Image (cartoon, rainbow, N blue to C red):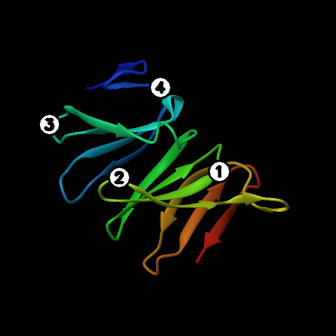
Amino acid sequence: RIGSRGSGELQLNNLWGLLTNEYNNDIYICDVGNDRIQIISENLQYKSQFGKDTLDSPRDIKLYKDNIFILDTFNPCLHRYIRDLVLQQSVVIRGVGQQVRDPWFFFIDKFGNFLISDNGYNSILILK
């Protein structure tokens, strides 16, 4: 077991999504209450964190074609980071009269489509 409640290294506040990076076996943790992604090694040691200045309740995270995608709930955006954790793109998924109200999870299908679950409208948004 790792972690405890808080905002420091290896401390979490409302854990949601998890990702194991297939390239280096690092574990990425969506730390919703601290608005960040924490990275720990496969040996369960703290490595780093990112997103504190850009994320607002990150709930889900996926690795797809050398990119890390993060579903950010209260922004709400789908963020794309390249492997060196540089933010490349943010797609707003809520707007006037459209899209989502309360995004929770997402899936990327074999064609590269993003399926985003929306608890607010009880629906699934598909981004092609």
Q: Image quadrant for the C terminus?
A: bottom right
Q: CA distance from mark 3 to mark 4?
A: 21 Å
Q: CA distance from mark 3 to mark 2?
A: 21 Å
Instruction: Provide the residue designation for mark 1.
Output: 76
Going from N to C along the chain, the mark reached first, 2 or 4, is 4
Q: Look at the numbered disc 1 and give the secondary structure of its residue.
A: loop
On residue 43, the disc is 3
- Amino acid at pointer 4: Asn
User: Do the residues bearing badges 4 and 1 touch, measured as CB atoms within 8 Å?
Assistant: no
Query: In the current view of this chain or complex, which residue is farthest to the left?
Result: 43
The spot of residue 54 in percent (x, y) is: 53, 43
Q: Look at the numbered disc 4 and give the secondary structure of its residue.
A: loop
User: Do the residues bearing badges 3 and 4 touch, measured as CB atoms within 8 Å?
Assistant: no
The residue at 51%/38% (across/down) is 53
Q: Look at the numbered disc 2 and give the secondary structure of its residue.
A: loop
Q: CA distance from mark 1 to mark 2?
A: 19 Å
